Image (cartoon, helix red, strand yellow):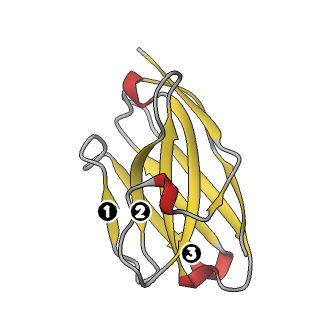
Amino acid sequence: QLHLVESGGGLVQAGGSLRLSCAASGRTFSRYNMGWFRQAPGKEREFVACITWIDTTYYADSVKGRFTSSRDNAKNAVYLQMNSLKPEDTAVYYCAAVMGGSGVHYSPQRYDYWGQGTQVTVSP
């Protein structure tokens, strides 16, 4: 079982950067695929990025080349570096976890554990 806590959100101007962190409790963190999702008001939760338990990364087309996910298993943490932010990136960002080894999951329904979310607001 994992407990996830995100941090690092905030208000930034377009073109700026933020780094989100997700701290996990649990001794088997290294075995989990870690996903990042976001949800804007009135919209469905959407896939942003995934870093697998074997350290491969996948990104939504909308963030490819601008966002980078990484993990530090020694710290039980996963990160989302967000550069060249756009107003359309404004959303609540969530980290999520699912046991690795069963492929990459893009649907939020496939993830078992979720953080509480952190707000990212990008002003024009």
Q: Secondary structure at mark 3?
A: strand
Give percent across and percent down for residue 107.
Answer: 42, 55
Q: Position of residue 22 (x, y in %)?
A: 63, 58
Dot placed on the residue nearer the N-terminal end, 3 or 2? 2
Of labels 2 and 1, earlier in sequence is 2
Q: Is residue 96 left or right of residue 124?
A: right
Q: Are marks 2 and 1 in contact (CB under 8 Å)?
A: yes
Q: Residue at x 46, y 27 (%)?
A: 43
Q: Amino acid at mark 1?
A: Tyr
The residue under label 3 is: 72
53 is higher (above) or lower (below) than 14: below
Against 89, is 20 above or below? below
Question: Which residue is at a point 26% across and 49% down the rendered structure image?
Answer: 64
Find out whether the residues at labels 3 and 2 contact each other: C-beta distance under 8 Å: no
| Residue beneath disc 1 | 58
Q: Amino acid at mark 3?
A: Asp
Query: Badge 3 local density, few (<14 within 10 Å), some, or many (20+)?
Result: few
Q: Please tell me in which quadrant of the rendered image residue 49 appears.
A: bottom left
Q: CA distance from mark 2 to mark 1?
A: 5 Å
Q: Residue 89: which quarter of the image?
A: top left
User: Badge 2 is on which residue?
Assistant: 50
Few, some or many residues within 10 Å of mark 1 (<14, 14–19, 20+): some
Q: Nearest the camera: 79 or 17?
A: 79
Q: Amino acid at mark 2?
A: Cys
Question: Does the rendering let one see residue 80?
Answer: no
Instruction: Give the distance between the C-alpha atoms of the residues marked 1 and 3, in whole angstroms.
Output: 17 Å
Marks 1 and 3: which is nearer the front?
1
